[in-house]
Amino acid sequence: MMDLPIKFLEKMKLLLGSEFDDFMSSYDAPRVYGLRINPLKLSVSEWREISPMKDRVKPIPWTKDGLYYTEEDRPGRHPHYNAGLYYIQEPSAMLPVELLDVQPGNRVLDLCAAPGGKSTQIAGKLMGEGVIVSNDNAFERTKALAKNIELAGVRNAVILNEEPAKLAEVFAEWFDRILVDAPCSGEGMFRKDENMAASWEKHSVVKCSIMQKDILAHAAAMLAPGGRLVYSTCTFSPEENESQIAAFLAEHPEFYIEPVLPPGGITQGRQDWIDEETAAKLEPDRAESLSGTVRLWPHLLEGEGHYAAVLRRRGERSRDASIAVSAAGYPLGDKRANAKRPVKLRGASAKAQRTSKQAVTEADPKESWEAFAEKELALDRSELGEPVAFGSIVYLQPQGLPSLNGLKIVRAGWLVGEAKKGRFAPSQALAMGLKREEAIRSLNWSPDAEALNRYLKGETLFINQEDIALADGAEPKGYVLVCADGYPVGWAKYVDGMLKNELASGWRRI
Ligand SMILES: C[S@@+](CC[C@H](N)C(=O)[O-])C[C@H]1O[C@@H](n2cnc3c(N)ncnc32)[C@H](O)[C@@H]1O
């Protein structure tokens, strides 16, 4: 039996009454495991054709691409993981994005996004059209966020490291969809992570609910009229769930709850759990609408537990032409449209900008990219973002963004590579976002090939030239896109029988 905080147990007993014993028995039941197939790479049925796990998985009812797997399968160790074919995610955490109803072409904000489970799910719904702005205010956590987004092969994400108030100054009424997967006391994570139970007092319910209120208020300011906002937590406390949403409705008459018809095992939100003070501020029908939010309980379904509310903003968005902006972030036609914009960069991007101030760059990095893409890729660039360079690093930035002036940027778009000493070095993110046939040279190994295992460990290999698939007219020497089962895992450089490993250092198997 797990060691759970006494105060938590007393509270749950009071809330759940006769259901409490069933709830408690869920802590003795084994954990369940989930993964979500990445539609940017392949469909569930295509994955089933190639996966050794295919006969042991079963569908997660509330997510088209979600599957339960057994612990022994260890999908994180299979090369399909290195190829970004799926994301390992707690099953109930897959619901909020389903409720967000993302459509290709939408502008979506994932406000509390690290480590990126839900951002990658959103990107899979956008299918490369529109933009996802993925933000987290904890810089260290944005590193995992960027890696997961890149692993999934997302081409249309911008990753920021900001406070919601700062974002709201730039993105007023800009987004069609916003996800607030709020920081919370994590009561639904106790079974998965015992540390969460130990630190429950520290992340107190009261502290979290103050934080959530502030985040929600800024999120509301960024949603366009007619837009949809999903609020979710992985905790059970009503203060962070129904009462939080009730307080939000009381302060935001322009929002209403869109009721969710709970699929099997998912239950309605508990309108009777709203605290009295908040309930008194709401009209009765608005208070009743809280039963249109949803709860996932570990004793009623196979998942750790979650809460989600779908909020709609009244009105209709008016999309005007002035939204079209230049790469410099100003509306087209504005005299500043070609101006260089001062931006704050974080991590690798910041380093590249510092370096570029010291060294004289021989060629415009964007031109280096264009030359590389022209020669080495069979990629239709007309559908992709606008090349923008920060120092020597080149990104393809989704079009139509407002100026990111003054924001802390982790990724200004799809990081395609770096111009170094007159050459262009393609990035790991570029490899992951390409399809095999979009590179003029590729090499494909089966997942159990020893050569692939050695490549993933970062070793240099010796291969037969004939193993490289070449586009018409391409010579064997040069960058090769290395694939597992036809899906890219990274770059290598081929010269005279030798395959120099270009797999990014943080991506190698240890
Ligand atoms: C529940 S986790 C998000 C999990 C993520 N959505 C996923 O699916 O992988 C909450 C996140 O909120 C971030 N956070 C906390 N306070 C924040 C704030 N004021 N603004 C933005 N992010 C915040 C935390 O750093 C944490 O990464």
Image (spheres, grey):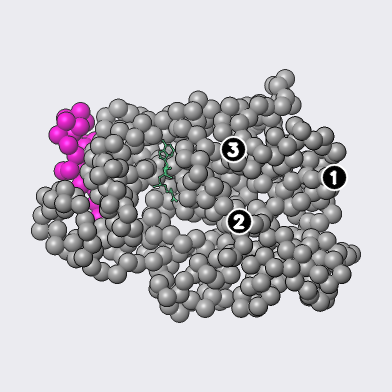
Left or right of residue 275, residue 127 in this image: right
Q: Quadrant of ligand 1?
A: top left
Graded by Cα atoms within 10 Å as few (under 14), some (14 to 19) or many (20 or more), the crowding at tag 3 reads some
* Label 2 element class: helix
Residue 346 badge: 3
* Label 3 element class: loop
- Indicate the position of residue 121 as horizontal and vertical percent values: 49, 54
Residue underneath mark 2 = 506
Would residue 469 be counted in the magenta stretch?
no
Q: Nearer the viewer, residue 132 or 333?
A: 132
Q: What residue is at 84 percent from the left and 54 percent from the top?
A: 375
Residues under labels 3 and 2: Cα distance?
Answer: 17 Å
Q: Quadrant of the N terminus?
A: bottom left
| Type of amino acid at the residue the image marks with label 1 | Gly
Q: Quadrant of residue 411?
A: top right
Q: Quadrant of the C terminus?
A: bottom right
Left or right of residue 340, residue 423 in this image: right
Q: Is residue 293 visible?
A: no
Q: Nearer the viewer, residue 366 or 361?
A: 361
Among numbered discs 3 and 1, the one appearing first in the sequence: 3
Residue underneath mark 1 = 422
**Against 56, is 427 above or below?**
above
Among numbered discs 3 and 2, the one appearing first in the sequence: 3
Would residue 275 be counted in the magenta stretch?
yes
Mark 1 against mark 2, which lies toward the viewer?
Answer: 2
Graded by Cα atoms within 10 Å as few (under 14), some (14 to 19) or many (20 or more), the crowding at tag 1 reads few
Q: Which residues are magenta?
A: 266-289
- Mark 1 and mark 2 residues within 8 Å of each other at the beta carbon: no
